[in-house]
Amino acid sequence: MDIDVTGKLIGRNRRNGEKGQNLVEFAMVVPIFLILVFAIVDFGMGFHAWITVTNAAREGARVGAVGADSATIEARVVDTASSLAAADLNVTVVNAQGAAGEAVSVDVQYDYDLITPLSGLLGIFGGGLGSPITFHSEAEMRIE
């Protein structure tokens, strides 16, 4: 091997000592990237569940406003929220088939389970996000 004027080796491949560096960097970045991707998917699915619960409560109150009984209102709510797990859906109807001018109230709660272990990860940073997250919506309409 030859040495040039500055003292550097000539003809030597400088990358010989960096053969595994890319693999190490990849192994360090991939978990963070995957958590970020799954958190984005989790947020989208949670947002969908929240909108569905709100819409289902509104639909139930609309059916109740035209004189439907509690069973019909609950069936409409479950049908409207068919994209959610029915076992995690809790529907409460107040004043179904009441007098005209009174209000029927429909309360819908849904427990959304996160697919990403965000609660454990945020616990590291001092925060916390409980799982399941309960989405709650109440709709009230005047009976016709």
Image (cartoon, rainbow, N blue to C red):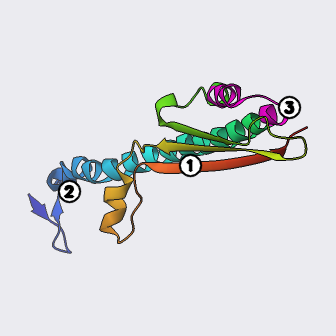
In this picture, residue 14 sits left or right of residue 85: left
Q: Residue 58 in magenta?
A: no
Q: Residue furthest front?
A: 99
The residue where tag 3 is placed is 66
Answer above or below: position of 25 versus 41.
below
In this picture, residue 14 sits left or right of residue 128: left
Dominant secondary-structure state across the stretch colored magenta: helix
Provide residue 128's location: percent of width, then percent of height.
39, 64
The kind of secondary structure element at disc 3 is: loop
Name which residue type carries label 1: Phe
User: Of the numbered discs in the image, which one, if any, rests on residue 98?
Assistant: none
The image quadrant where one finds the C terminus is: top right
Say which label, 3 or 1, has the lower sequence index. 3
Specify start and end residues of the magenta stretch as a single range. Answer: 62-78
Q: Residue furthest left?
A: 1
Out of 104 and 40, give the one closest to the viewer.
104
Provide residue 130's location: percent of width, then percent of height.
40, 56
Q: CA distance from mark 3 to mark 1?
A: 26 Å
The residue where tag 1 is placed is 135
Q: Nearer the viewer, mark 3 or mark 2?
A: 3
In this picture, residue 111 sits left or right of residue 54: left
Badge 1 density bin: few <14, some 14–19, many ≥20, Cα 10 Å: some
Name which residue type carries label 2: Arg
Asked if the residue at tag 2 contacts the one at tag 1, i.e. Cβ–Cβ closer than 8 Å, the answer is no
Provide residue 52's location: percent of width, then percent of height.
65, 38
Out of 98 and 10, give the one closest to the viewer.
98
